[in-house]
Each structure stands twice: as C-alpha cells, then as structure tokens.
Amino acid sequence: MQRVSASLPVFPWDTLADVTALARSHPDGIVDLSVGTPVDDVAPVIRDALAAASSAPGYPTTAGTPALRASAVAALYRRYGITGLAEHAVLPVIGTKELIAWLPTLLGLSPDDLVVVPELAYPTYEVGARLAGTPFVRADSLTQLGPQSPALVYLNSPSNPTGKVLGVDHLRKVVGWARERGVLVASDECYLGLGWEDRPLSVLHPDVCDGDHTGLLAIHSLSKTSSLAGYRAGFVAGDPSVVAELLAVRKHAGMMMPTPVQAAMGAALDDDEHEREQRARYERRRTVLKPALQGAGLTVDNSEAGLYIWATRGEPCRDTVAWLAQRGILVAPGEFYGPRGAQHVRVALTASDERIAAAVQRLTG
Ligand SMILES: Cc1ncc(COP(=O)(O)O)c(C=O)c1O
C-alpha cells in the first residue's frame, strides 16, 4: 500500500518556522499577515442561528435544507447579479477547501484526464488533482494549452494570491472555449465580494454565460465574506447535472454539513448588513496598508480586489519575507503559489485594526 501523503506537496507553511520566530521576537509582538485567517467576530445574527439550531439529534441532509438552498440562490442574485439558478443547482460543502481537494475525485477524473490551474494559485487545486491521480498544468491563457482538451479548468477571480480580476471578455472566452470542448469550468469565487479597484464578475453572471450554466460551477465560501472559516461553510452552484452528480457521490461519502452550521450559513446568506461591514473593514485595512508597503519600497502588483496585497522588492521572495519579519511582520512567500511568485510576497488583510496599525507604523516609522 502506498502512502497517499507521499503524493502530496510538502505543507509549505512548515517552512516558515524561522521567520515566524523572528517576527515573534519583535518587542511589540508579531503582526501575522501570512495565512489569511479571519479575525473579526462572527456576527450575532449568525451565532444566534447556530445556537437556535443546536438541538440536532438527527442526521443532516447532504443536499442542505430547502431553506438553505433558497437562501444561497437569493444571495447570489442580490449580491452578485446571478440569475436563472434553481435551488437544486446549489449544494452546501464543508468549507470550499474540502470541495476543491476532492472535486476531481468526486467527478471520477483519472490519470488520462487533465486539470488546469492558474499559474499562481491556491495550492489545493493541485492537491485535488494529485488525490485523484490526475495530471495538472499551470496556465493562465488558453493558447498555453495548445490542442489539449482538459477535463477541468479552474478560474479564481479575484485571485489568491495576486488579487487580479479576470475581465468579462476573458471569462466569456474561457466559457465559450470550454463549451466547444465539453470542458468543465470551476470558478473559485471565494473573494468575489471584495472588489476594490475593479468589479469582479461570477462565471454564472448573465454577462459572462448568457444565462446558460451548462458546464459551469461557481464555488462560494463564507469563510471570508462572513468570517465563518471556523464553521466550515461554503457551497457550489451551477450546472444542475454536475451538482446532482456531486450530490449523489457526497451522500454516500458522508460529506454533509452539520445542521447547526446549515442554519448559521442560511442566516449569513440572508443578511447583507454584516457582509457589507466585513467588506468595509478589509477596505479600511487595505487603504492604510497598501501605501505603507509602497512607502517602504515595495511595488504592489495587481491587488485590485480580494483579500491580499501582492508585492515585491525585486528580490527572492524569501529575502522579502525575512526583511518584513525583522520588522515583526509575517507574510507568505509568493513561491507557495507557483514558480512565477518567486519574487513576490502575499500580504493578507486579515489582522485586527490594531495589528494593521502596528504594521503601518513599523513600515512608515
Ligand atoms: C482561493 C481560495 N479558495 C478556497 C479557499 C478555502 O476556503 P474555505 O475552505 O475556508 O471555504 C481559500 C482559503 O483561503 C482560498 O483562498
């Protein structure tokens, strides 16, 4: 028997131990902008819904309650202008990392298939391909693929790590190309609500897909928009036949969201107020942190949307990580996300206002 872990990449965060210790040794403490884990309180409306649903002796349904599915459809329309989605075209997942890590396996992809991931990408796309034993390539443009016809193409706009937004023309081109070839497009829309200098569009938006969701999946997480990373709450929406297939497999595999979390996620999707407040917090943090990084000599690239600032000092990323760690600021080396990130660092906006102010002071003082 072969160990599955042997086929997976080294967990990259383990390589940051030394710089973490260095940043921790700062007299005013560490400002950890590396992982992107939310720090703001969960909104009372969500916590109340969780508590009210806490007597849950029976099994939850894998499909999610009808109320939850309706809430997801309504929120996608209100927040992102997505139309034409039926409730059976939505499926809750136990955090979107879970779905992404297992999607190629759930879809039955094999070593003869191919998964396409962005050149700079959230590492779990690669992990999912490896778990299924399916080859993957990094490509941002269709011309890079040549005549190859992959089974699955990932999009991620706004991007983790770069904050780049894919324009409507690019999205339409990918959708049209994929349709001609029967390729499934999975659009990871984790940061869709965080557009700063650009307005990100869902792959399910009518301007992108002309109202036809065939061959399209949009992956939505509540971890960042509602600070629910600890609840493990997300959902996938799109092509009803693909969603039905995922549901059929997930039912057997026990991939069901706990009942109290379903209730909490429904409450989060029904309430736009807390989501707007969370967005405003990130915007405020970005407004002070971005110029502070630039003032300290870093060049900011892309970063027009999303939860991260993608910056460079024109040197190997590990040197920049060490330079910032000397100031007690911990960031992620760009190489975690692909070879093209070798000279960049990713700076997350996920720290308290007080910690962000401390970082700004250290960079400008
Ligand atoms: C691009 C992207 N997709 C998916 C996820 C996973 O989010 P979660 O599993 O919390 O829903 C993350 C988390 O940081 C991410 O950056």
Image: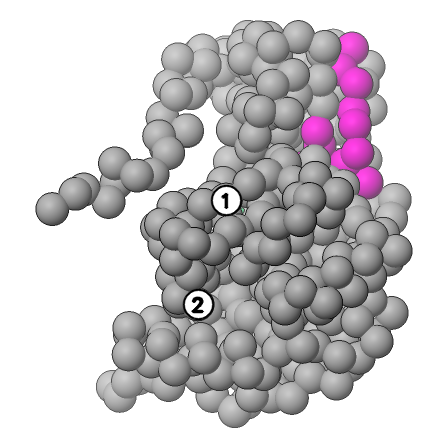
Identified at 26% across, 40% down, the residue is: 5
Residue 318 to residue 106: above or below: above
Q: Secondary structure at mark 2?
A: loop
Query: Which region is colored magenta?
Result: 296-310
Is residue 42 within the magenta segment?
no
User: Which of the labelled discs sits on residue 107, or is there none?
Assistant: 2
Q: Is residue 132 left or right of residue 122?
A: left
Q: Quadrant of residue 85?
A: bottom right
Residue 99 to residue 238: above or below: above
Question: In this orientation, which residue lies closer to the viewer: 329 or 73?
Answer: 73
Identified at 55% across, 70% down, the residue is: 236
Question: In this orientation, which residue lies closer to the viewer: 270 or 345?
Answer: 345
Amino acid type assigned to the residue bearing label 2 in the image: Leu
Counting from the top left corner in percent of width and height, residue 109 is at 42, 61
Is residue 307 within the magenta segment?
yes
Answer with mark 1 or mark 2, whichever residue precedes in sequence: 2
Tag 1–tag 2 contact (CB < 8 Å): no
* Magenta highlight: main SS: loop
Identified at 18% across, 42% down, the residue is: 3
Counting from the top left corner in percent of width and height, residue 275 is at 69, 63
